[in-house]
Amino acid sequence: MTGVDHIGIAVRKLTDAIPFWRDQLGLQFVAIEEIPTEKVRVAILKAGATRVELIEPTSPDSPIAKYLEKRGPGIHHLALKVDDLSARMAALRDAGRPTLDDAPRPGADGSVVTFLHPGNAGGVLVELTQTAAGRPKH
């Protein structure tokens, strides 16, 4: 682990959520990115060295839409940076705490990611993220 990458926050609409985080809290707005494979749009904001990602569903059958239906808006996950995602996934699998994916999948900002089920992480949905080679993260 090399640190906290971001905190993911589920929101119903980016247009409603961004002004609070940007204007009232003073986070620096970076970009909005769509991740079609996850059926979400993500607003990336900087809070010092850490990012806050506001996550809006783009389809009623997306995991974020289902999360919002069940729990409402709020903290969805904690993302931790790793240098070698595949190796970390193998180590977790060997320790009896497999990730939700068999292989890394595309994430926001050019990264590859996987998730640990909250049951394997003390009740917290944990995302592990690795920056794509040669591409600095926002």
Image (spheres, helix red, strand yellow):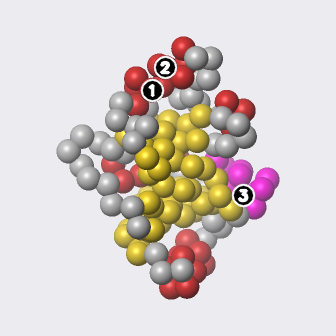
- Crowd band around label 3 with a 10 angstrom C-alpha radius: few (<14), some (14–19), many (20+): some
Decide whether residue 62 is among the magenta residues. Answer: yes
| Outermost residue, right side | 70
User: Residues under labels 1 and 2: Cα distance?
Assistant: 5 Å
Amino acid on which disc 3 is placed: Leu
- Indicate which disc residue 88 carries: 1
Image vertical order of residue 114 relative to residue 19, above or below: above
The residue that mark 2 highlights is: 91
Q: Where is residue 131 in the image (x, y as percent from the top left)?
A: 33, 44
Q: Is mark 3 on a helix, strand or loop?
A: helix
The residue under label 3 is 68
Give the residue type that dot 2 points to: Ala
**Closer to the camera, 116 or 63?**
116
What main secondary structure does the magenta stretch of the protein show? helix
Q: Determine if residue 37 is in view.
A: no
Labels 3 and 2: the sequence-earlier one: 3
Q: Earlier in the sequence, mark 3 or mark 1?
A: 3
Vertical comparison of 13 with 124: above or below: below
| x, y percent for residue 58 | 57, 59
Q: Which residue is drawn at 67% across and 43% down?
A: 124
Q: Place residue 88 in its image quadrant.
A: top left
